[in-house]
Image (spheres, rainbow, N blue to C red):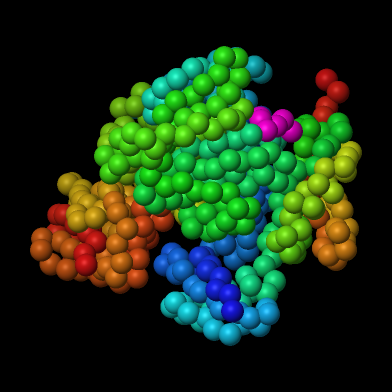
Amino acid sequence: MEVDIVVIGGGPAGLAAALSAYEKGITDVVIIERDFELGGILPQCIHDGFGNFIFGEMLTGPEYAQRYIDGVEKTDIHVKLNTMVLDIDSEKRITAVNPEDGLIQMEAKAIILAMGCRERTRAQILIPGDRPSGIYTAGVAQRFINMEGLMPGKKVVILGSGDVGLIMARRFTLEGADVEGVYEILPHPGGLTRNVVQCLQDYNIPLHLSHTIINIKGKKRVEGVTVAKVDSQWKPIKGTERVIPCDTVILSVGLIPENELSQKAHVQIDSRTSGPVVDECMETSIPGIFACGNVVHVHDLVDDVSEAADTAGKGAADYVTGKREKRTIPITVTNGRNVAYVVPQTIGGKKVDDVTFYLRVKRIEKNVKVVGSSNGKEIYTKKERIVKPPEMVKIHLSSDELRNIKNELLIEVNP
Amino acid sequence: MKTHTFTCIKCPLSCQIELIEENNEILKIKSHTCNQGEQYVIDEFTNPVRILTTTVCVENGILPVVPVRSEEPIPKHLMKKCVKELSTTKLKAPIACGDPIYKNILNTGVTIIASRDMPKKSMT
C-alpha cells in the first residue's frame, strides 16, 4: 500500500501533525495508533490546565484531545487503531500489525514520528531492595485510577517530583489514599510550581528535596521504604535514614523519548534530548522522516507539542509536494552557557520563516538574557527574570533575524 | 497579627508573597513583584477556588469510569467532600462530553460535567 503521509502515534503530536498536513492539501494521510482510541496520554490526564495557549481556556486532557479528534473525524484522514508499528526503514517502508488486517506493509512518501515518551522505571534508577508488587510508575497508576477504575494502594510514598508524580499525589489523596510524602533527589522540584502548589501544598503533602529512597522492603507486597537525605553528589548521608511503612511506591523519575523505531530507520539521535535531531520543519536526518512532540524532547505543556506538530505536518506536506528547497549545508544550532539543549538543532531550508526555538536550562538563574549569536555577532536577545530547568524557555526568531546567520547559531543564557 | 506565606503561580518567578492579617482583615502584602501577585494572594486568602476533576463509575461503558470536572471552580476546602459525594454516583453509558453529571454539588451552585464521551460497550 502506498500512502502520502503516515503518522506514527495518535496522541496530541500525531493528531495535530496529521491535521496540519491535511490542511496543507495532503488528503492521503494515515494515523497508526497502538491503543484502542486516539488521544495518547491525554485521556488519562483528567486534571485541568491544558490548552491555555492554543484555545485560551483551561481544559482537561480528554477535552483537549477531543478537539483534535473531532478535527480528524471531519477529514478523510484514515485512522488505524490497535495497530502496532514493528519496523520502519530509511526508505520509509512501514511494517505494522493488528488483529484485523494481520501484517500490514506500507510505503510512505513521508513519515511523521509521534510516538511520545516512556516513563523511567525502577530498573533505570537502580533502587536497591526487594522486588514486591506495589511499585508503579506515576503514569501507570494514573491509567489505573483514571481509566480503569482501579486503586493501586492505600499508603503511598512518591519518589521524584515530576509533574505526573505531583498530579498523582493529589489524585491518590482525593481518592482516599494517604500520601506520606514526595521525595526528590534534586534540591529543586522537578515539576511546575503550579503543580507543587495545587497538588502538594493544597493537601499538606510534604515535599522532601535532596532526598531519595535507598531501600524497598516487602515480601509479596511493599511493606515499607527507607529514605535518606543526599549530599550534592546524590550520595545518601549516613544517619539521616528513616523507615516509612507503606504499601505503594510511585515513581515519577523522568521521561525518555521513545525512539526504537526512529533508530531502526537510522535517524540521527541527539544525546542531549534522547530524541531525533530535527531542523526548523521538524525534519530528521533522513529526508522525508519528520518527528514531533515528546519523541523529540520532553515537553512541559501539550500546547507546545501541538504547535511543533503543526510545523511537522506542514513540513511533511511540503516535502510530499516537493515545495521545499534545502541548503547544501544546514546551519547548526549549538547550546552555550547554561543551556542543556536547543530544539530544533539545525536549520535546513534555503528560505526560512520565523522559527520557535525550545531550550532547557541546566540550572536556576535570575535576571538573565537569552542570546542568539552567529560568528560572534549578536542577532537576538531576550531578557528573562528567571529561568528554571523544569520550565522550558521559548524564543521566537524572525526570518529577518535568521537571515543574519552565517553557518552556526549559538544560543546561550548570560547573566 | 498573623503572617501567611504564599507561593505565587502567576509566572515562573514563583514569588514567596507574605500576607499579614488580623481577624481576617488584610493589613499588608509584602515581597510581591507585580499587581497580579498581589491579587493572587488576596484571592488565595479570602476565597481559594479550584476546578475539581475526578472520575465517576459507569455501567456498560467502554471503560468502568468516566472523567468529570466542575463547570466552575469550587471552594478549595470542599474538594475532598465533593469527590466523596460523587463516589456514590453511578452512571449509565452512553455519556457525552459536557453532559451534566451532578447539579449544584454540596449547594455550591456548581454543576459537575463529563469531560469525555463514554460510548456503550458493544455486545460482541
Q: Nearer the viewer, residue A395 or A168?
A: A168
Relative to A115, residue B100 above or below: below
Residue A244, position as x, y percentages in the image? 54, 33
Which residues are drawn in magenta? A149-154
Magenta stretch mostly in which secondary structure? loop
Please tell me which residue is depicted at 34% across the width and 61% down the height of the picture.
Answer: A387
Q: In the drawing, does residue A378 fall left or right of residue A12?
A: left
Relative to A141, residue B75 above or below: below
Figure quadrant of residue A394 = bottom left
Q: Nearer the viewer, residue B44 or A341?
A: B44
Figure quadrant of residue A238 = top left
Please tell me which residue is depicted at 60% across the width and 15% down the height of the picture.
Answer: A220
Quarter of the figure that contains the C terminus of chain A: bottom left
Residue A296, position as x, y percentages in the image? 39, 41
Instruction: Please tell me whether residue A151 belongs to the stretch shown in magenta.
Output: yes
Instruction: Please tell me whether residue A404 belongs to the stretch shown in magenta.
Output: no
Residue B85, position as x, y percentages in the image? 84, 49
Please tell me which residue is depicted at 60% across the width and 53% down the height of the picture.
Answer: A204
Task: Tell which residue pokes out farthest to the bottom in this image.
Answer: B27
Residue A52, position as x, y percentages in the image? 57, 62
Please tell me which residue is depicted at 86% across the width and 59% down the height of the picture.
Answer: B106
> Can the viewer see residue A395 in this picture?
yes
Q: How many marks?
A: 0
Task: Tell which residue pokes out farthest to the left in this image.
Answer: A376
> Can the viewer see residue A27 in this picture?
no
Figure quadrant of residue A297 = top left
Q: In the drawing, does residue A46 fall left or right of residue A273?
A: right
